[in-house]
Image (cartoon, rainbow, N blue to C red):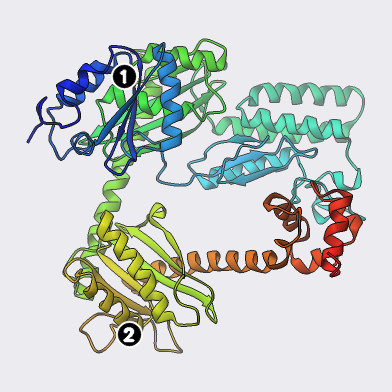
Amino acid sequence: MSQTKDDHPILNTDFLKTIPNSPGVYLMINKVGKVIYAGKALDLRKRLASYARFQGAAHSKTGVMVSRIARVETILTRTEKEALILESSLIKEHRPKYNVILRDDKNYPLIKVTVGETWPRVMMTRRKIKDKSRYFGPFSSVGAMWSTIRLLQSLFPLRRCKGAELEKRSRPCLNFQMKRCPAPCMGKVDAGLYQEMVRDVLMVLEGRNRELAQKLKEKMSLAVSRLQFEEAALYRDQLRALEETLEKQIVAGEGALELDVFGFVRQGPSVAISIMTVRHGRVLGQQVFFLAEPVGEDAEVLAEGVKRYYEEADFIPRELLFPLLPDDHQLLSEWLSERKKQKVAFKVPVRGDKTRLIDMAQANAGQVFSEKDKKEKSWDVLAASLMETLHLQRRPDRIECLDISNISGQQAVGSLVCFEKGEKSGKRYRHYKIKTVPGPDDYRMMAEVLERRFTRGVDEGGLPDLLMLDGGKGQLHVAIDMVRRFALEDRIELLGIAKEKGQEGEKLFRPGRKNPILLPRHSPLLLFLMRIRDESHRYGITFHRKLRHKSAFSSEIDKIPGVGSMRKKKLLQVFGSLAKLRNASIVELAAVSGIGPDLAEAIARFFKGEG
């Protein structure tokens, strides 16, 4: 089935007549008022008319999106470039469902250099936040990332202690004795020399290894000329380690080459985009994104990918290579050039070394589909085995597991985790604070959470194929009653999993079956189900502890006049517990950022019962 111009109740001829042939941004909004797509156009009427005349299949992603449009809003701009910038900010704000949002299948690690600190550190992180630090990566291989950190630590031993502020010590730590830290906490290193090491670390991470190698050679020669042989030996060792690293890196061209190489592969409705980073003539790494069913033709999808990638990028290279030119490439080049304050060229190479780089990027993008095929085949085997062993009537492509966490009914929470085709689906994880059960009653708590989950699931769709309960027959019967209440018997399969007691092993309970299903301890099926159960337990306990900690700390401090959320956070960071805060002196309190002597005195009086 396809749509014609008059099929759509919103994008009709009368509506299109009200839209000017001007540049601007359009927002497609569904019946509940949520923005589902944001786009920009040089000619708004022409662009919206293309959706009205959409001739593709109604079940395609574009067809589904068009069918869900309840309202369209437009914002006029003076130029297409202004529309591009506005579109980017609106996508950040609304995160529309049908726009290209670049997400990795994995949460790749980054290397963080805390250059905003007086004594910077090098560390691994998986979160990029807006602080004064420099971030490098992401690294597709955790092993490669740690190898890089170990190399940096051996070449330039910066401090490894935690905390942005350096605490003074009466004697240096073990790292100093092992020559892994210059002990700035003891004043044993000059601040200028330390900052020079930080700059050298940044040179390595920026790919300027050859420049750094030349710098080390000059330092070694100077040390020899001054008869400082121990210092020269140190530079010699650093130089050898650096040259070994250079030998392992893939050479991409002449030494000054600085570019990003895009790979783009489509299989059916799905697209994979790879981005390979080349700095100073060497391939430093790559990132690959999988888009299940993006809206638009290949050039449009690639353009969306370029916009999403560089709107958050810290660095923009002078040249971008593509297997095909993205839509609006001249406008994108102009936008990136303004951001870089230097010309950024878009090229499709047809010969030479750069075509080989495109081939590499294309191969990396295509590898995503191979890996997904392997995962799907592996899941097919596991799903079939689950259906046979647990006597399921439907394939469990979406499994959810519910766990209740509380101590004597206090700070009770329900945690729901979701696995789709055998993999974690973190975006579907949910916490439920128990609202209606005052005491320790796991069954009623579970009933409350299931009622809230099914109510939302029935209204909005997206129910699990298999719902697991962390517990035995009692928890299973609660779920059976709730499933019957919502008339979901033919939609949701149920499974209880009871923790091992003694030598009995894990027990699996199914509706209509008197005795539990017992699987061998090392059964892949049992290990998979235990992994899901343990994940729900971990997710619930983490949130439960957070609530307890917050409650314990907040019970009294929230009553202190003049102490709001930000000051409370500062006090928590410094003292860590209510007991330590209660015993703190006025001088210690006043030393906390944002407190000051007057408020410190008020806090001290409060805890003495004088406030």
Relative to 32, residue 322 above or below: above
Would residue 315 appear left or right of 382 to someone viewing this image?
right
Q: Marks 2 and 1, how far apart in space? A: 59 Å
| Residue type beneath disc 2 | Lys
In terms of depth relative to the viewer, which is nearer, 343 or 320?
343
Residue 67 rendering spot, x and y as whole percentages: 18, 37
Residue 434 rendering spot, x and y as whole percentages: 46, 70
**Residue placed at 21% from the left, 20% from the top?**
16
**Residue placed at 34% from the left, 70% from the top?**
450
In the picture of the structure, the residue carrying the numbered disc 2 is: 473
Residue 522 rendering spot, x and y as whole percentages: 37, 75
The single residue placed furthest to the left in the displayed view is 1
Relative to 31, residue 363 above or below: above
Would residue 208 appear left or right of 600 to someone viewing this image?
left
Crowdedness near tag 1: few (<14), some (14–19) or many (≥20) residues, C-alpha within 10 Å: some
* The quarter of the displayed image where residue 346 is located: top left
* CB atoms of marks 2 and 1 within 8 Å: no
Relative to 346, residue 134 above or below: below
Q: Secondary structure at mark 1?
A: loop
Would residue 406 appear left or right of 154 to someone viewing this image?
left
Work out whether mark 2 precedes mark 1 in sequence or the reverse, and give the earlier one: 1
In the picture of the structure, the residue carrying the numbered disc 1 is: 324
Q: Secondary structure at mark 2?
A: helix
In terms of depth relative to the viewer, which is nearer, 346 or 242?
346
Q: Nearer the viewer, mark 2 or mark 1?
A: 2
**Residue placed at 57% from the left, 17% from the top?**
255
Mark carried by residue 388? none
Crowdedness near tag 2: few (<14), some (14–19) or many (≥20) residues, C-alpha within 10 Å: many
